[in-house]
Structure formats: structure tokens, C-alpha cells
């Protein structure tokens, strides 16, 4: 009985001390799925907070590498209420916010950042979390709020050389309704408004050709052709032009938003690195 | 002293067996822990990596049952069937494993469906509800195969009295009636209709909107061709151009109409396959869970 007990204890000790190394080496080998299982095994077997924390962050890394941000989010949520030291809980909280951002749940990022003070003894959120909040607000196109948080962060960080205030040039988005309305009454005007003169000229030419064909056919007594080709060509390109103008404005707006958000992201990352 | 080596060997082998049993139950608990955390693919990986060569029959049964169930929950049907079929008759959840294996095979469709009915027929079932459940599953499988002769003997075993599958039994009867009542339309007739009136073949096949959508451009091209013929004559470029376009669209519609009969039939079959499979599934979950 004693021998069995000793053998079991020895094997358990050896196994548990090598688990962490196994998981790390699997991670380093790029076998993220197997590594995440190995980290889960540590969480299943071990009760000491050090090993558990190592496994939590290890598994989070694996899930991020696999692009499974939603799973990472849920996984970290489950460990939020665990009695770890506050510094570790703060790191879990940050990782959760990061995975939530990477998963595209921007409203949830805001909620996680706002919860920070309540969950960490009234402390102000770390700069990196504030950055996540700004980026999430940008993605939601709530630039006014993002600008306020951004300026507060710059003032708080107090860099040696103040960076240019990007929020003084918030992207001016074009109106989809206006583009549709323009194309409805002036062929090609919607495309021109969306900043695509080439497409505007093409639209004008095709619609004019349709009308011209209809008129000429009518004068030559080709009434069916005038109606079914000329008028149909004009009608089809006119309605298509209205829809195209809408698409082009959306593309233009998306491009503007992406460029602005990217500029803010780059500036904030370099600010954090200082 | 001479006894020392055999004794050490004995202790070693005893501890190894004990260790394996300990490891196995721990692996099973770990897999269950992963499943509880909705990490089912990870649980499957853990279960697949267990070395079965040293396990007892009961341990293997537990392992295969758990693996089958995990694979089933993430719709890895091949894996699920393979694991469920390895469960031995001595295991307490043998019937459940076999029923779910059969269901997975039925779900996999042609090529597996005969194995599903064979597997169910081989079962020795002491319980009358289970026997009726088997009849119900076999009836569903018969309908999936569109084997109406095989459906009727199974359907005659329905009692319509058990709350577990009373509604599904009624629905299965309804599916039988609908499937039998489905008129197999002729692709040839659809082509003829479209030749007489463009789009009519698609209307006949049950695709009314497509019929209208085919009719409008063809009739427009016909009008343009006629106008070109009346004003410019047969040899004019205008007539030849519109005439060619009209012919292409006209023949294309006839060809499309013949195909639309087959497409409509496939859509109908798929719709009823999904309904049958859905209703086969509900009683299984109600009875076994």
C-alpha cells in the first residue's frame, strides 16, 4: 500500500512539473490546439495560482494565435471571479478586453473598460485599456467621445513632444441619401459626388446613348426598338446608377474611416511604446 | 535474495496497471471537464489519444460512448458512428449508442442508410417503448430511402399513445402522404410547354417567378425580331442580330425548363429529408436524455 502511494505521489509530482514545459514547447512548435489542451490540463490538475495563471495566459495566447477570439473572451470571463492577486486579475481583464476588441465586439469593450474601476478597487484603467476604448469608439464611429478620451489620455501621459491632435480632422462622411438623390435627377452626379469622375462620365454616356437610340429609332418608326432597347437601356442604367452611387459612397466612407482609425491606432501604439 | 527480482517486477507491473486505471479515469474526467467548458473538439482529441490496448472492456465502452457523444455534438458524424458502434452490448448505454449511431448514419445519407436500418434491426430490445421507437426510426429511414413498401409495416406498429413520439408519428404519416402525393413532372413536357409559350415550362415545374422572368425578355426579343423582319426584311443585319439573340434565349429557356423540373424535385426531396431527420431526432433526445 505504501509502495503504491509513493509511486503515485512520485509520478504525480513528475507529471505536474513537466506539464507546463510540455505546453510551452507545443506552443513554440506552433501546435496551438494541442498546446491549449495542455494548458487546460494544467488548469484541471493544478490548484496553485502560479501554475493556473501561467496556463490561463498560455491558453489565451493559443486561442489568439488560432483567431478564436470569442472562445478566448468566454474563457477569460470564467476566470475573472477567481481569487487571484489583483495584478493578475487586471491582466486577465485586459486580455479579455483585447480579445473582445479583436473579436469585433466593440460595445462590449466599452463595457469592460468602464467596469475596470469597480473591479479593481477604484483604480483608473491602465493606458493600454484606454487605448482599446478609443479604438472601439472609433470603430463605432463615436468620434466625439473618442476624441475626449484621446485628449484626456494625451494630457495624462504628457509626452515630451505632444503629437498632433488627430481628432481635429474627424473624417467627413458623405451622405448616401444625397448620392441617391443626385443620381436620380442628374445622371452621373451621384458617382461624381462619391469622388469617382470616371464612373460618372461612363454613366452619363450610357444613359445618353440610351435616350439617343430611343429618339433616333422613334424618328425612323422603329417603335418597338425605341421602347425595348433605347428606353430599357436608359432605365436600366439609370436605376443601376442610383444603386451604384450608394455603393460608391459607402466604399468612400469606409475607406475614410479605416484610414482615420489606422492613423489613430498607429499614433496611440507609438505613444504607448514611449 | 532470489525472490527480489520477481517481487520488484510484480510490484512494478501492479503499480503500472493501477497507474493506467488511475490515468484512464483521470483522462475521462478531463475530457468531461473540457466538454462542460464547451471545448468539445479538445475533448475529442483527448479521448482519441487514450491508448485502448490496456483498457478493460468496461473502460473501452465508457471511452467509446463518450467519444461518440462528443463527436455527435459537433456533428463529426463519421467519428461518432465509429465510436458508438464500438460500444459492447454489456454496456448500460448500448441501446442509446446504437440508436444514435443509426441516426447519424441516416443523416449521412446514401451509402450509410442501409447500415442504419441493419444496425437497428439487430438490436434485441426488451422494452415495448424502445421497440416502437425502433419502428419509428425504421419508418423514418424507409421514407428517407423513399421505400414506401418498407414504411408501411413499420408504421403499422405506431400506437400514437406515447408522449415521447406521438406527434412525430403523426407527422411521419403526413410526410408519407405528401411524398406519395408528389407529382413527378416530366422534363419533356416542361420543354414542350416552354417551346409553345416561353417560361411556361418553368411555371409548370413550380418555378412561377422564373417563368415570368424568362417570358419577358424572350417576348421582347421576339417583338424586336418581328419589327426588324417587317421593316428591313429577312436579309437585314438587324433581323439576323435580333433573330439570333431570340433563338439563343428561346432555346436556352427550353433547356432551362427541362432542368428546372429536376431542380424542383431535388428541392422538394431535400425539404422532406430535413423534416424527416428532424422528427427522427426529437424522440431520440426525449427518450434517452
Image (tube, rainbow, N blue to C red):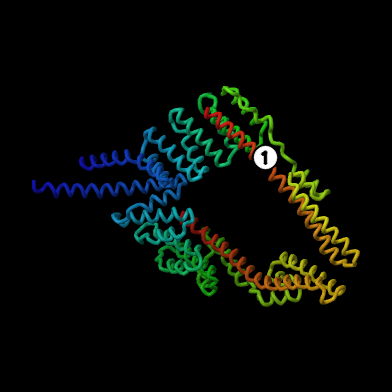
Residue for point 26% across, 48% down? B18
Q: Quadrant of residue B53?
A: bottom left
Looking at the image, residue B188 lies above or below residue B72: below
Q: Is residue A184 left or right of residue B158?
A: right
Residue for point 31% across, 57% down? B57
Q: Position of residue A46 (x, y in %)?
A: 36, 37
Report the front residue among A221 and A59: A221
Q: Is residue B218 left or right of residue B151?
A: right
Residue for point 78% across, 71% down? B241
Looking at the image, residue B100 lies above or below residue A76: below
Numbered marks: total: 1
Q: Position of residue A1 (x, y in %)?
A: 21, 42
Q: Quadrant of residue A213?
A: bottom right
Q: Chain of mark 1?
A: A
Report the front residue among B233 and A63: B233
Looking at the image, residue B15 lies above or below residue B210: above
Residue farthest left in this picture: B1
Q: Is residue A252 left or right of residue B166?
A: right
Q: Position of residue A214 (x, y in %)?
A: 86, 61
Disc 1: which residue:
A256
Report the front residue among A210 and A153: A210
Q: Position of residue B171 (x, y in %)?
A: 58, 63
Location of the N terminus of chain B (image quadrant): top left
What element does badge 1 sit on? helix
Q: Is residue B160 left or right of residue A139?
A: left
Amino acid at each position: 500500500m505504501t509502495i503504491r502511494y509513493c509511486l503515485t505521489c512520485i509520478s504525480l509530482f513528475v507529471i505536474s512539473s513537466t506539464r507546463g514545459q510540455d505546453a510551452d514547447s507545443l506552443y513554440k512548435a506552433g501546435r496551438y490546439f494541442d498546446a491549449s489542451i495542455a494548458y487546460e490540463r494544467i488548469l484541471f490538475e493544478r490548484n496553485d495560482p502560479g501554475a493556473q495563471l501561467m496556463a490561463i495566459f498560455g491558453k489565451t495566447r493559443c486561442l489568439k494565435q488560432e483567431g478564436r477570439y470569442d472562445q478566448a473572451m468566454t474563457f477569460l470571463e470564467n476566470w475573472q471571479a477567481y481569487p487571484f492577486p489583483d495584478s493578475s486579475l487586471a491582466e486577465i481583464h485586459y486580455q479579455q478586453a483585447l480579445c473582445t476588441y479583436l473579436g469585433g465586439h466593440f460595445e462590449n469593450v466599452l463595457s469592460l473598460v468602464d467596469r475596470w474601476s469597480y473591479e479593481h478597487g477604484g483604480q483608473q484603467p491602465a493606458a493600454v485599456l484606454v487605448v482599446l476604448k478609443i479604438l472601439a469608439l472609433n470603430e463605432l464611429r463615436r468620434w466625439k467621445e473618442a476624441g475626449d478620451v484621446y485628449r484626456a489620455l494625451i494630457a495624462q501621459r504628457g509626452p515630451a513632444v505632444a503629437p498632433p491632435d488627430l481628432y481635429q480632422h474627424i473624417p467627413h462622411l458623405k451622405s448616401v441619401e444625397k448620392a441617391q438623390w443626385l443620381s436620380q435627377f442628374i445622371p452621373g452626379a451621384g458617382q461624381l459626388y462619391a469622388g469617382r469622375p470616371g464612373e460618372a462620365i461612363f454613366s452619363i454616356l450610357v444613359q445618353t446613348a440610351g435616350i439617343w437610340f430611343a429618339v433616333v429609332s422613334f424618328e425612323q418608326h422603329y417603335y418597338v426598338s425605341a421602347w425595348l432597347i433605347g428606353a430599357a437601356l436608359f432605365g436600366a442604367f439609370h436605376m443601376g446608377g442610383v444603386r451604384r452611387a450608394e455603393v460608391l459612397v459607402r466604399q468612400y466612407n469606409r475607406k475614410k474611416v479605416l484610414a482615420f482609425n489606422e492613423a489613430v491606432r498607429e499614433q496611440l501604439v507609438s505613444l504607448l511604446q514611449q | 535474495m532470489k525472490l527480489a527480482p520477481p517481487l520488484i517486477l510484480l510490484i512494478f507491473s501492479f503499480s503500472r496497471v493501477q497507474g493506467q486505471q488511475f490515468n484512464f479515469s483521470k483522462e475521462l474526467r478531463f475530457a468531461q471537464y473540457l466538454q462542460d467548458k464547451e471545448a468539445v473538439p479538445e475533448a475529442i482529441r483527448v479521448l482519441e489519444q487514450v491508448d485502448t490496448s490496456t483498457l478493460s472492456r468496461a473502460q473501452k465502452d465508457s471511452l467509446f460512448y463518450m467519444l461518440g457523444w462528443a463527436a455527435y455534438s459537433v456533428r463529426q458524424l463519421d467519428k461518432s458512428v465509429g465510436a458508438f458502434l464500438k460500444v459492447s452490448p454489456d454496456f448500460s448505454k448500448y441501446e442509446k449508442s446504437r440508436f444514435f449511431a443509426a441516426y447519424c448514419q441516416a443523416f449521412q445519407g446514401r451509402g450509410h442508410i442501409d447500415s442504419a436500418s441493419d444496425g437497428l434491426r439487430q438490436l434485441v430490445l426488451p422494452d415495448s417503448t424502445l421497440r416502437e421507437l425502433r419502428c419509428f426510426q425504421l419508418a423514418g429511414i424507409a421514407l428517407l430511402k423513399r421505400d414506401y413498401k418498407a414504411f408501411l409495416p413499420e408504421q403499422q406498429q405506431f400506437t400514437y399513445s406515447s408522449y415521447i413520439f406521438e406527434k412525430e408519428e403523426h407527422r411521419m404519416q403526413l410526410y408519407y402522404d405528401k411524398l406519395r402525393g408528389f407529382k413527378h413532372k416530366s422534363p419533356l413536357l416542361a420543354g414542350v410547354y416552354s417551346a409553345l409559350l416561353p417560361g411556361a415550362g418553368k411555371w409548370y415545374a413550380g418555378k412561377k417567378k422564373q417563368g415570368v422572368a424568362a417570358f419577358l425578355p424572350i417576348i421582347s426579343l421576339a417583338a424586336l425580331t418581328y419589327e426588324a423582319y417587317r421593316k428591313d426584311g429577312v436579309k437585314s443585319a438587324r433581323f439576323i442580330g435580333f433573330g439570333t439573340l431570340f433563338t439563343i434565349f428561346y432555346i436556352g429557356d427550353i433547356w432551362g425548363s427541362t432542368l428546372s423540373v429536376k431542380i424542383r424535385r431535388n428541392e422538394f426531396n431535400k425539404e422532406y429529408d430535413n423534416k424527416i431527420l428532424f422528427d427522427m431526432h426529437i424522440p431520440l433526445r426525449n427518450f434517452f436524455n
